Amino acid sequence: SAPQGIVLQVCPLLESLEEALTSHHDTVRLAEQPDPAAYLAEHGHEVVAAVTSARIGVSNELMDALPKLRAIVHFGVGYETTDVARARAHGIDVSNTPDVLTDCVADLAVGGLIDVLRTLSAADRYVRRGEWTPGGYPLTTKVSGKRVGILGLGRIGRAIATRLEGFDARISYHSRRPVEDVPYRYAASPVELAEQADVLVVATAGGAATNGLVSAEVLRALGPRGYLVNISRGSVVDEPALVSALVEGGIAGAALDVFADEPNVPEPLLGLDNVLLLPHIASATRETREAMGELTFRNLDHFMAEGTLVTPVPEVSPS
Ligand code: 8YV
């Protein structure tokens, strides 16, 4: 049945999405309220749907302030910022934006991998500094044919693997269970995966279940000739251990699009040429962000018309 009530926009979103929300639904932007807490105290019980980003989610406190809430619609594929079990217990459905960003995130993972093995960003800085002397730039590492371990073989992990097949990569993976119908070797643990990989690519979901999965031990298994690529969540990697490994040569390098406490990047990484630092841009193309905005809107719109979501999050969190 069609829910009656207010749509709460929890945080700033893509402009075209904000416009669609406002022109089709009774939408209130929480961040634009002069006193958000006062607004919630007065109107919280009128809100039936909340639209938020993967980064912000809906906190338990906000959930409690919205007693009639029936849907949480996320812009983004990650939703670890919302306690989904708690939402379900309150009769709230949750959606995200899978598939539409898979290409761009996988593209960026491969771009980061090539950048850090061939030191593209560092070489660019070298040229710009005017330091180019013929033969003066150090040799790097070949990409094609490398052993790549993918942690988390969901949609994005698979898209990364498919792309790397074009580079003759020897691919293995670890996830909670082996995935059927894939030609890649399954490693029983993250340590085993790292031991057998030249490059470890993190493509698992964030959240409590994967917190610190790439531990100091995993980084030791990756070793001084191994590289790390992370396009998932900073929380999956023990960041202090990663910083130590990079500073001390425990691993060879890293391409990082995500960090434990964005937008704060650990200071010791800023001076390292074997680390690619990106500002969480894997899905940030015009095409993909528009597609994410459209899917976010379709979820909200369908919910307001029929009371159900188009792309609800899975019952059990993905691998
Ligand atoms: C965005 C993301 O940065 O989809 C995700 O989980 O992390 C990214 O696509 C995020 O959704 C922006 O809110």
Image (cartoon, rainbow, N blue to C red):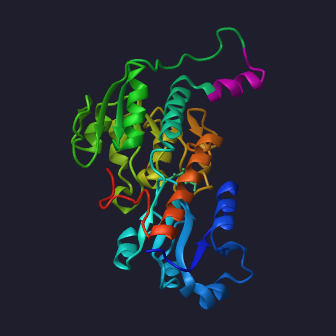
Residue located 57% across and 47% down the image: 291
Question: Does residue 280 show up?
Answer: no
Compared to residue 212, the image places residue 282 above or below, namely above
Q: Quadrant of the N terminus?
A: bottom left
Q: Indicate the position of residue 150 as horizontal and vertical percent values.
A: 36, 37
Q: Indicate the position of residue 236 as horizontal and vertical percent values.
A: 41, 52
- Of the pair 13 and 106, the residue shown nearer to us: 13
Question: Does residue 52 show up?
Answer: yes
Toward the top, the furthest residue is: 134
166 sits to left or right of 282: left
- Of the pair 302 and 236, the residue shown nearer to us: 302
Toward the bottom, the furthest residue is: 42
Q: Main secondary structure of the magenta part?
A: helix
Residue located 44% across and 63% down the image: 309
4 drawn magenta? no
Tell me where the magenta segment starts and ends, as one range.
121-132
- Of the pair 172 and 253, the residue shown nearer to us: 172
Residue located 62% across and 47% down the image: 290
